[in-house]
Image (spheres, grey):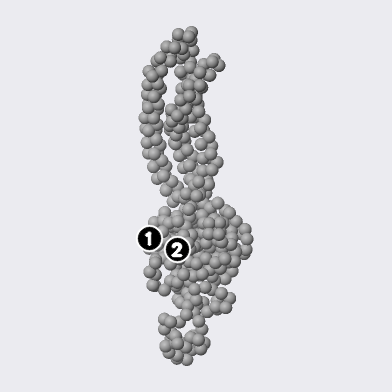
Amino acid sequence: MNDVLYLAWRYIAYHRIKTGILIASIMLIIYLPVGLNVLVDQSAQQLTARAGATPLLVGARGSPLELALNSLYFESDTPALTRYAEAERIGASELATPIPLYVRFRSRGQPIVGTTLDYFEFRGLSLAEGRMMATLGEAVIGATVAQRLSLGAGDAVVSSPETVFDLAGVYPLKMKITGVLAPNFSPDDEAIFVDVKTAWIMEGLGHGHQELASPEASSAVLSREGNRIVANASVVQYNEITEENIDSFHFHGDNAEFPLSAVMAVPVDQKSGVLLMGRYQGESDASQIIEPLSVIEELLGTVVSIQQFVVAAVVIVGLATVATAALVFMLSLRLRRREIDTMFKIGASRIHVSGTLVSEVIVVLVLAVLLAAVLTVLTSQYGTDLIENLILS
């Protein structure tokens, strides 16, 4: 038996290029459907874990999927906007704790999330350095943002204008970083967090400018009528909030009418959640309430359907590859006719010759299966990191 295995191994080693191609082809055919299933299962766990940890989302009527993706992963386009009055409405009901979210702006490609300190407590986020934001113009960044942009507590980030020619008065705002969050292995690592009022300042709903009563602003004053001062466009507006100018920042209008992309509602208990959902079932209501988990599971149902088509295609390609491999072995036997005749002439029995040829096939298959198993194990171990780098980047 040892001599049969030795001859088979020596033949494989000598024809290593042909053997390597066969092993790689068979390995991929085995690994692709298995690895795809592993990745889909892990991505489903990633998506449903965050969605399952978020009880309810309230937003303007529109696409539930867009609302869920924007609020949970900060990656979708900004959904139809709701008002801050919705957060006040939820709070007044005493059925849930409202956590406002305004996800619209970015800084160097990273999403800026306007929210409150309740968000950090709800998500279980902690600081690796620095402190939480406390006033307007302060920001806390995720671990990935800090690493990717080489930023830390004491540095600053500047919001990006939505368009290159943004002439609508929405100024880039320079924000001081007060803290860096510890890694959470979630979309929170990719975000820049500010107070929701800071996000409204980026929107242009609030601003700070030089004191119009001061002599330095006299050139910008058009008229004075008692305490009422009318200024022209040359008045200096601040694009950074500091201790010296923070008192000059103010908002025009009612906060209840200011925009939010969503309100995260954390019910007091299950019964309160059901009652709250019932209050948004009227067709006349301009807002909608969704359960993120059901929305994401519906999305995953579509993904699984696509996966089945992909697996079917891989199986078809696999059958073609197996047929090609079988053809290669059959042609190899014809090319090795003189070699086989020589083995018979030197005294090898038919069983030994057949055993040698079969052993070559078995060795190729075993090596392919082992390599596919190794790749599957690596995928199961590092698939989560791969998903985070691909989906969350």
Which residue is at 37% across, 36% downward? 313
Please tell me how crowded label 2 is: few (under 14), some (14-19), or many (20+) other residues with Cα within 10 Å. Answer: many
Tell me the element at label 1.
Answer: loop
**Count of labels shown?**
2
Residue 285 place in picture, x, y as percent: 40, 63
Q: Which quarter of the image is occupied by the N terminus?
A: top right
Which residue is at 49% across, 20% downward? 8
Q: Which residue is mark 1?
A: 283
Q: Nearer the viewer, residue 45 or 60?
A: 45
Q: Is residue 290 visible?
A: no
Which residue is at 59% across, 66% downward? 154
- Residue 104 is tagged as 2
Instruction: Name the residue type under label 1.
Output: Glu
Q: Nearer the viewer, residue 380 or 97?
A: 380
| Picture layout, residue 354 above or below residue 135 | above
* First of labels 2, 1 by sequence position: 2
Mark 2 or mark 1: which is in front? Answer: 2
Residue 70 place in picture, x, y as percent: 45, 57
Instruction: Name the residue type under label 2.
Output: Arg
